[in-house]
């Protein structure tokens, strides 16, 4: 009907309210004082949605898939035996695809899908604290968006890192991420937290 687009936008909030995390990972390459950090996240969610109207449709479901990829360059500004502090920045890209299915009722069923993608600039900082020869703690944070892609986005994660070889480290920890995106009729507000694993190679 004429209100299909409107109700669809409104449903975005409900869809992301029950987002389940599918996969998050980190990969890093280090050389001297420079680090290139990449992270990737894949989300997939399916859920029933309330159907407006008096029996026009018998039911409905929404499926959302999302991919997030970041590439961040970091430079070590200070380093000592206790650890190091790095500053830098980069980009984070998002892709969302949502499919809304309405089951036949008084009206025949229909499917509508929408895709949204954008890239955000981000500024980042990271601190690494050495616990002993093999173990360290990492805290990372970034902020971005600034209206270029999303209105505002931030991400932070904390990991425990274990040195498996002289030039290789594996990490496990927890990540929090937020986006607030508004363009036209698309309004995506997302807050998520979940486990993250990673690996770092030193050249």
Image (spheres, rainbow, N blue to C red):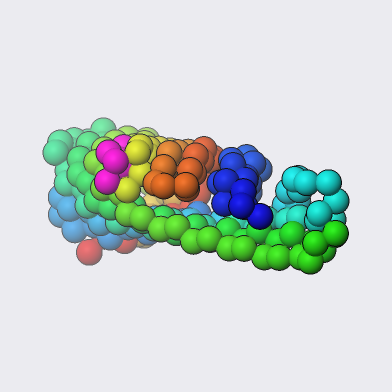
At which x and y percent is residue 85?
Answer: 22, 36
Image point 31% across, 37% down: which residue? 143
The answer to whether residue 172 of the structure is visible from this angle is no
Q: Residue at x 27, y 46 (%)?
A: 148
Q: Position of residue 104 (x, y in %)?
A: 82, 63
Residue placed farthest to the front in the image? Answer: 2
Q: Which quarter of the rendered picture does the N terminus lie within?
A: bottom right
Q: Residue at x 19, y 58 (%)?
A: 31
* Coordinates of residue 80 in the picture (x, y in percent): 18, 35
User: Height in image: 196 above or below 108?
Assistant: above
- In the rendering, at what x and y percent does residue 124 appear? 26, 40
Between residue 168 and residue 15, name the one nearer to us. 15
Question: Is residue 147 part of the magenta span, yes or no?
Answer: yes
Give the image quarter of residue 100.
bottom right
Q: Answer whether residue 107 is visible to the viewer in this image.
A: yes
- 7 with respect to 48 (left or right): left
- Give the residue drawn at x 48%, y 43%: 187
Q: Residue 33 or 125: which is nearer the viewer?
A: 125
Question: Quick check: 141 left or right of 21?
Answer: left
Q: Quarter of the image containing the C terminus?
A: bottom left
The correct choice, above or below, for 31 with respect to 162 in the image is below
Q: Is residue 19 magenta?
A: no
Q: Nearer the viewer, residue 52 or 147?
A: 52
Q: Which residues are magenta?
A: 143-148
């Amino acid at each position: 009907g004429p209100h299909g687009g409107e109700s669809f936008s409104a449903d975005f909030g409900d869809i992301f309210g029950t987002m389940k995390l599918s996969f998050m990972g980190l990969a890093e390459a280090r050389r001297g004082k420079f680090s290139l950090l990449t992270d990737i996240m894949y989300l997939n969610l399916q859920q029933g949605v309330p159907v407006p109207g008096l029996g026009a449709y018998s039911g409905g479901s929404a499926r959302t898939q999302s991919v997030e990829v970041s590439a961040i360059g970091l430079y070590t500004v200070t380093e000592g035996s206790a650890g190091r502090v790095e500053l830098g920045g980069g980009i984070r890209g998002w892709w969302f695809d949502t499919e809304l299915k309405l089951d036949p009722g008084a009206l025949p069923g229909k499917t509508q899908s929408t895709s949204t993608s954008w890239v955000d600039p981000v500024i980042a900082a990271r601190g690494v604290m050495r616990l002993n020869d093999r173990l360290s703690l990492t805290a990372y944070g970034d902020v971005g968006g600034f209206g270029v892609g999303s209105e505002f986005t931030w991400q932070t994660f904390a990991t425990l890192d274990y040195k498996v070889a002289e030039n290789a480290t594996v990490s496990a920890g927890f990540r929090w991420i937020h986006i607030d995106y508004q363009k036209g009729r698309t309004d995506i507000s997302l807050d998520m937290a979940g486990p993250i694993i990673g690996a770092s190679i030193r050249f």
